[in-house]
Amino acid sequence: MVAESTSRDVLVRGLRILGQAIREEPRIFTVSVVGSGMFGLLTIGGAYAVGAIVGGVVVPALEDGRADTGLLFLVAAVLVALSVLKVGAIFARRLGAAFMQYRLQASYRRQVTRRYLELPVAWHQRNATGTLLSNANSDVEATWFPIAPLPFAVGTLIMLAGAFVSLFATDWVLALVGAAIFPALFALNVVYSRRMAPRQIRAQALRGEVSAIAHESFDGALVVKTMGREAEETARFAGRATELRDSLIAVGRLRGIFDPMLETLPSLGTLAVLLVGAWRLRQGAVTVTELVSVAFLFTVLAFPVRAIGWVLAELPRSVAGWERVRRVLTAEGEMPYGGGVRDGRGTPATLRFESVSFGYEDSTVLHDVSFTVPAGRTVALVGPTGSGKSTIASLAVRLVDPGSGAVLLDGTPLTGLTAGSLAGTVALVPQVPFVFDDSVRANVTLDRPGVADEDVWAALRMAQADGFVASLAEGLDTHVGERGATLSGGQRQRLTLSRALAGRPGLLVLDDATSAVDPRVEAAILGSLRSADPPATILVVAYRRATIALADEVVYVEHGRVVATGTHTSLLASVKGYADLVTAYEKAEAERERERAYEDAS
Amino acid sequence: MSTWATMRRGLALSPELRTGLAGTLTLAVVSMVGRAAVPVAIQQGIDRGLRAPGGPDLGVVGAVVGITAAVLVVTTVCGYLMMRRLFTVSETALANVRVRTFRHVHDLSMLHQQSERRGSLVSRVTSDVDQITQFLQWGGVILLVSTGQVVVTTIVMAVYSWQLTLVVFLAFLPAIAVIRGFQKRLAGAYGVVRQRMGAMLAAISESVVGAAVIRAYGVSGRTAAKLDDTIDAQRRAQSRAMTLSVTSFSTGELASGLALGAVVVVGVLLGADGTLTVGQLTAFLFLVALFVQPVQIATEVLNEAQNAIAGWRRVLDVLDLEPDVADPAKEGVDLPAGPLGVRFAGVSFAYPGGPTVLSDVDTEIAPKSRVAVVGETGSGKTTFAKLLTRLMDPSTGAVLLSDTPLDRVRFESLRSRVVMVPQDGFLFDATVAENVRFGRPGLGSDGLALAFAELGLADWVEGLPMGLATPVGERGEALSVGERQLVALARAYVADPDLLVLDEATSAVDPATEVRLQRTLDAVTRGRTTIAIAHRLSTAQAADEVIVVDKGRIVQRGPHSELVLEGGSVYARLYASWLEQTR
């Protein structure tokens, strides 16, 4: 997904990102650039001060063999004062840069995560969890990485300008030495960052892959263990880890070439100053003081010039990170909510599917599905594995929108309701329960207003979850761990069912939501749902006869189409697929008994 | 573990790091000499060349410059060689640590694996290791070079003038004391940063993984507020740590100003006595700058070091966890050939610090039999399966397979003969074919197609958009839950085990498919031992024998037709509610 682009392109786009950063945080940027500029000027000033001290104080004093104590202390005071000013400049520069970077990171993390919350479930399904995590974390971080050295680099540019002015004022020949060395240093930096860019991007991509393999492999640890595939998994991981190692070594070799050169170049410049300076000194064009100042200047400038290199070196990573962040920020397909509000909170709603079709790029899941669940009634959705039942459940609560056709609640299309009204009316209990790393109470209430502890307990009772919650060490305050790790599958299902019930929904959608609960408990749950007052409208995906028996009507689906609608009895008589499905257990038993009878007889 | 102990153990973890260490260190020392070369050149140039009697002597200056340039070229080359070696050695060593830790995580028992957050286990083999290499390559070198720089600078200074050297040290002493003081607070501050970072990542992760729930319950406002809080808390922690760091850094800057001032005052006084030349004093001013740099840099490097040590500690923590359900490996034995029988001898099990889940289980399952284990939620039937497949070891008693104690069986033998299909049939982000092939690497596409046909699932495969080549998505989420179970079952089936343990393996499959699967499974696994943990009693009805577990004990055992007649029994009760459910 990394956009392949030329390095010139990267440079332009990278600079644009920096421009955007400056526009977003102009004040704090100004503070840190002023600090950086001040630091630069003080550094140059320091160099000249050292030169002046050597020429004006040290040389005369040593030549005369007599020191003027007063002057000496003045000199010392100036040096200390310069240091104090420099400290102020360092604070402004470094803290300014850091705070700017952190603020941008935080701001874009907020924007990205906000976008996650706005984008539809279908979008989430298309994007791997790991990718979304790194978009919000490391990609945002990478985007704003060059901000840290940016003020320093900008300040260095100011400093370089100042240095050249003072160089030319001192001696044009020495200035020419500078004019040769500093552009060379700059060019070396640019070459360095351009050659580094592709290697770093590759290393970053491999890091992501190594992490993804580890994540998946640890996620599936139980399967790996039960199949005894530890060695193969380790080999898979090692393969990618080795690639990462090689790519990091490639990065290191490049650093090995350029870092020492970048360090040596200014030193060579200082030597050139010494040589050329000696010649100019003999000509009487410069003084010893000036020569020392220029040499010192070269020494102190060598380090800041590298800050420009840091910014350039980070740009490719920044651009790659920004591309991924922008992909999230500009992702389309969010489901806009309407302005309609459904009246009558807690009263049962009517759900209607009108010629609903739904599919992904490569396949159609639902074809022309129509059915109605009248208010207060229960409809069972029955069909073989993979027939599209869960998709219908997702459509009913608007986790996804239909490709064509409409899903209506009390005659209003779901798309016309506000988010609040929709969430307050419909509730889905999914097949695979999702439990937050929080307390039992928070998992049930989800901080929805008006859900008090007694409502929580009532919901838990209805879902047959009050017993196990009461036996937990801290009751409602018990933390259930990451994804509810401390609970069993059946307990997690009952907890998510309580969550749905606590909102007193007008429409309850149960997607095989009691598959991990044993029959007796399930019977009790269904019993309490049936006797609720007022009765909720219920759409239930079911296989079990008892669940189906609870329904007023059955919608039977096969291969994404509604094959038949009617009462259980009528479908049993008229639809073979349905009859095969719901009587499978009886038939199996009957057949077994026939076989046994046959075996006994023979 | 103390810092030093961690470092020592961390280094011991990677003996590769010692490869050619002497050479690398020598190169580092040589490359460092380059830094002292320029001030020395300036001193020599000024004293012998520029201030030569009779005006500047270009010859001398030229010689000094030439020699120094040659030294610089040599040190640059040494620098390159040093970094090259360092990177190769450290990346190789740490890549090995990565892989070893990865393997170790898989070797840990299921209980250990589950007691850690996934994310934190992943970071052991990713960012924690990165932190160590970063330190070794960047911080480690800088620390070495800086120390060397201080030493070399000190020596050069002392050669020029011991009195001035003393002055410089006196000027720096208070700064070093202050910086040391800051070190502790900085370590604390960066600890907070890491912690806040973890909290932020956890919050983001939950908002991504739970996207559907957040959407369905309209709680994005609450989630957004929570996210903003953690993001902001992280930013504040970073800012605080940075403020401390800059304050500490500035102390060095102040000290350098102080040192410069003191050097000028004392130097001129000494020079006036004739003990110091102009060149020497000038060189001193440069040397002070060389002295202050490493002191300042060391502050930052020490932070990096703290992070690296924390990373090392976390990696060691994982490696130090002894796999409590360990592979006997070479000391172990192979399972005898042929169908496997099972015996539980006085088995009890309790989770560490938890209540007893199974107690005093004594039972035997004959080879080739098909047994169903049933019981209410929480009765201990899943624990039974986990002990049977040695995902856990019993607290007391022993599990034996064909009279071989399970903990003596080599994993290679055990895992190829005994396969369990867990309820959550985790799928890898690959195609259906690749997922099934996980059970038997190298199985050809004909073999795969045959396996699905034997299981009666050929129709289902045909209905998939791309047949066996259909990608199943992350964790198999492109398939429905029931379909995932079908793939997981096929995966176990092709592994061709002698003992197949099904733990609610078809709980999300429709009844018709389930019944069909059961019949085909019965047919194809005939002659092997099958143990099915189930709450759908259809499974029990089809089994040769049923084991009923209640409150951690086996309370009934026998064929369905007999058990159901035992009035008032647990099984009779279970069956009654099953009938109520399905008829």
Image (spheres, coloured by chain):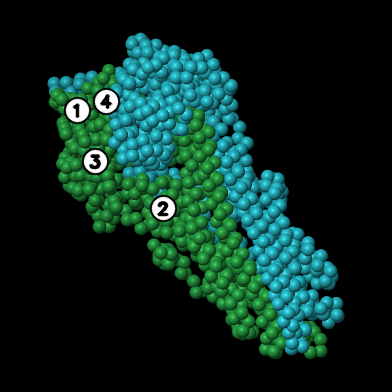
* Circles 1 and 2: CB atoms closer than 8 Å: no
Q: Secondary structure at mark 4?
A: helix
Q: Amino acid at mark 1?
A: Tyr
**For the residue carrying disc 3, how many other residues have a C-alpha within 10 Å: few (<14), some (14-19), or many (20+)?**
some
**Numbered circle sitting on residue B571:** 1
Quarter containing the N terminus of chain B? bottom left
Which residue lies at the image location 48% right of the left edge and 55% below the top edge? B191
Tell me the CA gap for discs 3 and 1.
19 Å
Tell me the CA gap for discs 1 and 2.
44 Å
Displayed quadrant of residue A486: top left
What chain letter is assigned to the residue under label 4? A
**For the residue carrying disc 1, how many other residues have a C-alpha within 10 Å: few (<14), some (14-19), or many (20+)?**
many
* Circles 2 and 4: CB atoms closer than 8 Å: no
Task: Determine if residue A502 is in view.
Answer: yes
Q: Position of residue A288 (x, y in %)?
A: 79, 79
What chain letter is assigned to the residue under label 1? B
Residue at mark 2: B102
Tell me the CA gap for discs 2 and 4.
43 Å
Q: Nearer the viewer, residue B192 or B41?
A: B192
Which is nearer the N-term, disc 3 or disc 2?
Answer: 2
Q: Is the residue A161 above or below the residue A417 in the image?
A: below
Which is nearer the N-term, disc 3 or disc 1?
Answer: 3
Tell me the CA gap for discs 3 and 2.
31 Å
Residue at mark 4: A520
Query: Position of B215 compared to A1: left or right?
Result: left
Residue at mark 3: B357
Chain in green in the render? B
Chain in cyan in the render? A
Quarter containing the C terminus of chain B? top left
Query: Same chain for the residues at labels 3 and 4, yes or no?
Result: no
Which residue lies at the image location 42% right of the left edge and 46% below the top edge? B118
